[in-house]
Amino acid sequence: MSGLTLTFRGDAGTIVDMSSLLPDRLAGQTAEDIAGLPLPCGGGVTTVGEMFELSTGDAAEAMLIRPGEAVLHRIGAGMASGRILVEGDVGSHAGAGMSGGLLRITGNAGDALGGALPGLPLGMRGGLISVGGSAGDRVAERMRRGIVLVDGMVGVYAAGFMIAGTLAAGGGCGPHPGFGMRRGTLLMGRRQDAVPDGFADGGTRDWLFLHLLRRGLEGTGSWFERAGTTRAHRFIGDLAEGGHGEILAMV
Amino acid sequence: MLTKLAGGRLFDPANGRHGEVADLWLRDDRVTANPGPGATPDSVYDVTGKVVMAGAIDIHSHIAGGKVNLARMLMGEEHDRHRFTGSACGCGGGSGIATPSTHTTGARYIEMGFTAAFEPAMLGSNARHAHLEMSDIPYIDTGGYLVLGNDDFLLDLIATNAGQAAVNDYVAWMLTATQSLAVKVVNPGGINAFKFNARKLDLDEAGPHYGVTPRTVLTVLARAVYELGLPHPLHVHGCNLGIPGNVATTLDTIQAASGLPMHMTHIQFHSYDTAGDRKFSSGAAALAEAVNRTPTLSVDIGQVMFGQTVTASADTMAQRHTAPLAHPRKWLAMDIECEAGCGVVPFRYRDKSYVNALQWAIGLELFLLLDDPWRVFLTTDHPNGAPFTFYPELIRLLMDRDYRLAKLAEIHPDAPAHTTLGSITREYTLAEIAIMTRAAPARILGLADRGHLAPGASADVTVYSDLADRRAMFERPDLVFKSGKLVVRDGALVAMAQGSTHVVRPGFDELIERRIARYFDERIGLAIKHFRIQDAEIRHGAGPQLHPCKRREVP
């Protein structure tokens, strides 16, 4: 790969804010330039070179991040284009406010994956996030466009206040899925027996839309590609917000 | 520890000094008299030609408590974008501009030479939180004004004609229990009426549930404050805030005090008239005239300055009214059960907006038309009109007419025609600034040892270079001492210091406590003993600084 590789080399448990390390922002810069950039870290500021070992390569091609034992928050937050691959786990707000590009995380993600940054009224606005493990609470909160794929479980308030877009959680959701949802789709790879709060039962059937979605996601390697069926139980809501959103639980 | 500030020009209006050259001596945390030729000071600062004033006092700045914290959360992006690392002196840094974190609040104030700022809207149920936050604000003295006037207990006392004595006891009990310095009333009766679906309540309109008019609430509270002998008169945030034509209500409110002392706060927001095509104009001239001839009245302005800020108020009625104008588009409102409410609306004042430009001009007009600097205070109603960090710019606008006219030429072209600002020639003098920001606030709050430089006063001292650019001068003092300790040198923090919390404790008849205890059990669901704030909870155990009250009879 001719992209840029960042391998964490600091102490285990170090908290780092990665929001400044975006492919479009680092494009065309040499490894030396990038190593000298300031990096908020553990309540203070250090440099990228201090915390990461950098390979030579252009971030415009792709960025590979190896977090090691660090807690990397806000990876890809605000990303507009490019590709980031993370080999390992990430902290909170990965891909928050993202408007384009691809973010692939092989491990687990923390809270607010594809969600909104503090104080901002909108979450993710475009692009694709795919997570191999599980994710925390408030995934895809206030999302407006784009797709978030999580192979494992997601926590509480999944797709909360979602305006539009798609969240597909293979392992299902914690309590209060789709809270305040206006439009959009929350797809679950599991049965959902109880009707979620604020939703109405829409019956079970084969959804043509899911065929299209599956075709669109070919090559991402996500759980949904492997799911054998397109039959799902549909719930409509959140009724308090007009009820144009849907939760689809695969059966 | 003896410190000498040699050769400065003292601006100490409380003691009749207006720029006289004299040495100032500080012993430990107090100003002291010249100890005579034999004394050897531990440190001497040559401040020849420089301006020496007491530390400034902000009498109205929302720096702690429930709504401030809600505003911080609502304005999360501001804390993301503006982070400050800690300084070498031990201040922990922080974040935020319009809703600064506690350490940032203290640091920004002391860097401008302010050594005290008072939280003007502390709800009883949020008082413990507010005190914990105030304990965490370094460098400056603080205190809270207790918000009454929409609480069910008081409205019930008034509606059932329980009598002034019962009201006085209740007010005194609440002040003591919540460790407050003064009483504030916010939209008297209006916040309560809002809960019963009223969206407007005029001064003489009976509230929908208790049938009590705002005028009655005002007079009853003003009388309670007077009779209990609190140093600070009733702090009034009137009815109809921000509504064109509200200057008439404000003039009526002055009448409602019927001779009792009253402090009317952020009057800029209460000085709007309805002349002109846009039905929005300045009512400043009429209001200034009324204030000028009412010596029992004091005011602060609540100046609007252009830029992004956030408005946070207990006045749910006014906040719901402005919510559609929120920028960025988000807001919150909250009910505080039996006490009041809370609304937070982000706002960006723009100089090219007719309304905002006029608000800016009205505030300045008021400053300049009010004759007596002892009765008018420098505030932006932080953060409602602007963050307090705009004070140096505001001082320059007041002291420099050419600068003011230049700024007036930049605002919305239709606005100047609806104010008299362009024709006002007055420029504030340094002595008047010293009165307005030091001597007068200390006097109106009853802080006997603050705001002046006589022997015995707290050694809170600010030294400025006398620059022609008054903004630069007041933005960056050369030296700031807090309680005798040098904490700022050339605008930068060099040492850590802690202020104290000021409170009053008028006595009350113990009988009222039984009645309040029953109310707490039945309506609030909290035992009265948990509501009461102990001295040990103030300033990490240091306890509050008490100020005496002198009971009086209404003549």
Image (cartoon, rainbow, N blue to C red):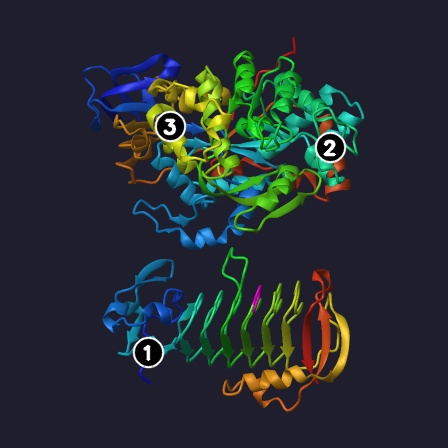
Res A40 quadrant in image: bottom left
Q: Amino acid at mark 1?
A: Thr
Tell me the element at label 1: strand
Q: Which mark is residue A5?
A: 1
Q: Mark 3 falls within which chain?
A: B
Quick one: B19 or A9, which is closer to the camera? B19
Q: Mark 1 falls within which chain?
A: A
Q: Residues within 10 Å of mark 1 (few under 14, many from 20)?
A: many
Tell me the element at label 2: helix
Taking the image as shown, residue B233 lies to the left or right of residue B108, namely right
Q: Position of residue A46 (x, y in %)?
A: 30, 62
Foreground label between 3 and 1 = 3
Q: Position of residue B452 (x, y in %)?
A: 38, 20
In magenta stretch: residue A141: yes
Same chain, labels 3 and 1: no
The answer to whether residue B447 is seen in the rendering is no
Q: Residues within 10 Å of mark 2 (few under 14, many from 20)?
A: many
Q: Which mark is residue B153?
A: 2
Quick one: label 3 or label 2, which is nearer the N terminus? 2
Mark-to-mark CA distance, 3 and 1: 56 Å
Quick one: A226 or B439, which is closer to the camera? A226
Tell me the element at label 3: helix
Secondary structure predominantly adopted by residues drawn in magenta: loop
